[in-house]
Image (cartoon, coloured by chain):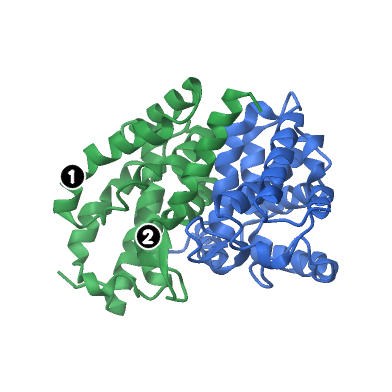
Chain colours: A green, B blue
Amino acid sequence: MNNSDLMQRMAFINEVEKLKLIVRQNVTIDGSRQENSAEHSWHIALMAIVLSDYSDFKNIDILRVLKMLLIHDIVEIDNGDTFLYDSQANKRKNEQETMTANRVFGLLPENTRNEFLKLWEEFEKRETPDARFAASLDGLQPLMNHLSSKGQGIIKHKLKTQQIIAKKQYIQQSSKELWEFAKNIIQQSEETGLYIKS
Amino acid sequence: MNNSDLMQRMAFINEVEKLKLIVRQNVTIDGSRQENSAEHSWHIALMAIVLSDYSDFKNIDILRVLKMLLIHDIVEIDNGDTFLYDSQANKRKNEQETMTANRVFGLLPENTRNEFLKLWEEFEKRETPDARFAASLDGLQPLMNHLSSKGQGIIKHKLKTQQIIAKKQYIQQSSKELWEFAKNIIQQSEETGLYIKS
């Protein structure tokens, strides 16, 4: 085998096996284990397909949204997932993730490396319609998971409802209907005792 | 909330949480647990993006390929993953999976339900370029996983190299280069003692 383009792509595909080992605060619906970032990425990519009509932006490019969602957590491979509500850890997060982005996307041939780096940066900035819609699904899935898994991963963090709303309200920038849905399940979760009323 | 279209889509999104609980014969690269079908689906969707230039078909539609790969294993939710080399179990597989497809895709509004059912059937038949390319990635990823995880999930099945080649050679229908790569890693795995020489 002397096709270096293909070998570079395959090195990347082998490297991202590690994302299956990065665990999140959420749990699977049977409560048996923590959810990992690879299966989370699958779930929100599927949500993008199923919910694309709910974007308030007229011209989102669903293929770009899918690419962003499938790669967005690869930057966690070296340092793990950062819990959204851990403000100290989030201060260190950007620099670490940029290093991992350069290392892991750097395994790829130049054209795909540059495409993925740009897509990841676009996702992180949440300025374009594609990035905002993608980010809204990344924000919504954990809320649905809290309720469907009966909060088995989240109760111990004693999150306040207002704290969650503050972190998630950006969803309304891309979809008023998804934000209405999100507020409704946040309230259901509060009533079930998963979050603290505030 | 009285938007029944959105409620149907969200019921589907909650239901497919179960795919994270469906385990495969392959293991994660640290050997700590069996891989599940949700993270496997993420991995091959990402492969489709990274390897799209290696399709021998000129006009594959990468968005359709991604949709196929993201939904293809949802039909396992009720009965689990069927090991490719278990011929008895594979005889029962089709009927069971059709029932699950109708049940789970049936949670969705009609337009998306019909789209997903057709995409899944197309994937299963492996007749179109999109389906053949998608299936070739579904066939390739386990081979890469066997080698990168040092066969921790596969050695016990005592698979013969010829048996694997017989099951995987359809990869060449969509990409001669990916099939060359696959044969190369099958040979490496045989040399490492993961498969039995035959």
> On the image, which quarter does residue B80 sit in?
bottom right
Q: Is residue A55 left or right of residue B118?
A: left
- Chain designation of label 1: A
- At horizontal 77% and vertical 30% (from top left) the residue drawn is B176
Q: Nearer the viewer, residue A141 or A77?
A: A77
Q: Quadrant of the C terminus of chain A?
A: bottom left
Q: Nearer the viewer, residue B156 or B141?
A: B156
Residue A179 visible: yes
> On the image, which quarter does residue B188 sit in?
top right
The residue that disc 2 covers is A23
- At horizontal 22% and vertical 37% (from top left) the residue drawn is A95
Q: Is residue A93 above or below residue B61?
A: below
Q: Nearer the viewer, residue A3 or B40?
A: A3
Looking at the rendered structure, the secondary structure element under dot 1 is helix
Q: Is residue B74 left or right of residue A36?
A: right
Looking at the rendered structure, the secondary structure element under dot 2 is strand
> On the image, which quarter does residue B126 sit in?
top right
Callouts 1 and 2 close, C-beta under 8 Å:
no
Q: Is residue A97 left or right of residue B25?
A: left
Identity, as a three-letter code, of the amino acid under mark 2: Val
The residue that disc 1 covers is A92
Q: Residue A92's x, y, as percent? A: 18, 44
- At horizontal 45% and vertical 31% (from top left) the residue drawn is A107
Which disc number belongs to residue A141? none
- At horizontal 20% and vertical 48% (from top left) the residue drawn is A90
Identity, as a three-letter code, of the amino acid under mark 1: Arg
